[in-house]
Image (cartoon, coloured by chain):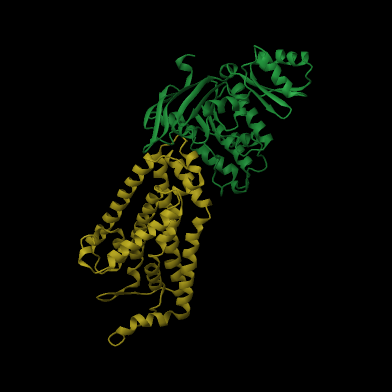
Amino acid sequence: MLFKSTYNELLKIAYKPRSYIGLGGIVLIIAIILFAMKVDGMLYISLITGQFEQSLLFEGNILNGNLIAFIIIQMLIIHVPLLIAFVTGDLVSGESAMGTIRLLLTKPISRFTILLSKFFASCIYTFIVTLCLAFMSVVLGKLIFGTGDLMVLKSDGLVVFQENDINWRFFYAFMIAFLSLVTVATLALTLSCFSENSIGPIVSTMGIILLFTIIGSMDVPIFDSIRPYLFTTHMAAWRYFFDDPLNYTQIIYSIIILLSHIAVLLLIAFLKFSKKDILS
Amino acid sequence: MSETNKIVEVKNLVKNYGSFCAIENVSFDVHQNDVFGFLGPNGAGKSTTIRTILSLISSTSGEVNLFGLPLNENRNFILSKIGCIVEKPDFYKYLSAQKNLELFARISGKSITKSRINELIDFVGLSGREKDKVSGFSHGMKQRLGIAQTLLHDPELIILDEPTTGLDPQGIIDVRNLILQLKNEKNKTIIISSHILSEIELIANRMIIINKGKTIVQGDVADLLNHQEIIVQFKLDNVPKAIQILKQHSDYAKCEIKQEDTNLLIHTSLESISAINNLFCENKIGVSGIETKRKLEDYFLKLVNN
């Protein structure tokens, strides 16, 4: 029954026009970035490399697909959660708003299974969005700009990764970015269980991300103790794969924090959804 | 009626929302092959009771048994034997009628073939529109699709909450005939709530009336109505004279009488109609029409207003 229900949920996502807004948004934004980089990319890069030109000599294709992909992920990891929440925040509340929740919950399938299937469907949707992001940034970036060494600007200097040392880093970076986005999807799904309309969970999810990001970026000692536990702090964990050497402890810690958030949010969602009186 | 024939058994059902009591000790049984009417004004607690039976809302206290089993412990098994429309027939409007039915068929707990879906689409008169998105459907078409969805898995118990709301007169007749067909030909048990009380009178054999969350009355429709007086409307050429005659007659002096233009409304029994008519004829009062107005509405309103 879980498989059939998950299939149903995927079907609903596939036929819902709003599901394509996220994917369309990613395609459009990346297309604009690629176009801008093609036209004025060197000027953009010189703003970054300018500070090192006194001491370093840059040779070869600096503005390559790898750098473009890195820039794109860095730019979009803030915006993609909105596109994810736009779909996953509607999975339960949308059914309440439409009235279909009454029909759905009178079928011989437990509420636990229904919510679990919605979670799996949101994971699959998030995976497709991540895949689209990866394809558009890495594959298309390399096709248009060619390949080459990746230059990453860090707070403590410039790190250059050799061309043959990059693909696996992107693979794992996207994997952990997927985990971050699943956390956002689960947050939106959980909030969706508390609402009877679609807008509330989407706005609330973005509000929470914004609040946590502000708390995380404020250099105030009072927030030092909670900052490491905020999921937003670990949404940039994909960047750890562009450290040399890799900080495995930090990566594992981020994964644990993100997984813990998913587990706790799912538990809250299950508790709420299983006791929810359907009054709509 | 034996215990085994009880399809639905509700005992002392209570549902509170904070300090507000939506249902207060409602108890009733629905037997096999009953068409059970569920009556009550808006806010009486009908939908709350129906939603409790369907496990859409939890009860504060009380017992709900279906097919002889407690609902809480056997939810999925019980729901696999029920088909329902709760309030409005809402569907995924971005999907076609056929896709909607396929989607619900998949989680109905039974193996439902495409030909069964097509058969039901045909049965409810939506052939040719099955590929259209539900967003373009009228309320009546959605109601028909709702009935098709209800029958998908050939349920033993059918619960229809306000099934004729928004339907045109032909649609209402079609739904009524369908319910009777399901009862008579397919031996289904049906619970139906409706605001169109005459509908219940025409199709239900048993009923319950609730108001403000409490049971007002329940039993066989025929028994409940037969024990009630009826209103007879005589169309007369001399109403004041007719009133005078009735007031002087020992049998009718205490009857409730009301004049409405050239009509005289008399609260009396079915057996008295011919005697009153004879009385008017003997006194040279022209009678141009007689109409009995005893309807469930009157009974319902009388009980609810009391």
At which x and y percent is residue A214? Answer: 31, 66
Would residue B255 be found to the left or right of residue B42 on screen?
A: right
Chain A shade = yellow
**Residue at position x 62%, y 25% from top?**
B295
**Residue at position x 35%, y 72% from top?**
A163
Location of residue B213 (image quadrant): top left
At which x and y percent is residue B299? Answer: 57, 24
**Residue at position x 37%, y 58% from top?**
A181
Using the rendered image of the protein, determine whether residue B190 is visible from the camera's viewpoint.
Answer: no
Which chain does green denote in the image?
Answer: B
At which x and y percent is residue A185? Answer: 39, 54
Would residue B209 be found to the left or right of residue A113 on screen?
A: right
At which x and y percent is residue A107? Answer: 47, 36
Using the rendered image of the protein, determine whether residue A242 is visible from the camera's viewpoint.
Answer: yes
Is A79 above or below relative to B289? Answer: below
Q: How many marks?
A: 0
**Residue at position x 61%, y 37% from top?**
B144
Observer-nearest of B120 and B180: B180
Is A191 above or below relative to B281? Answer: below
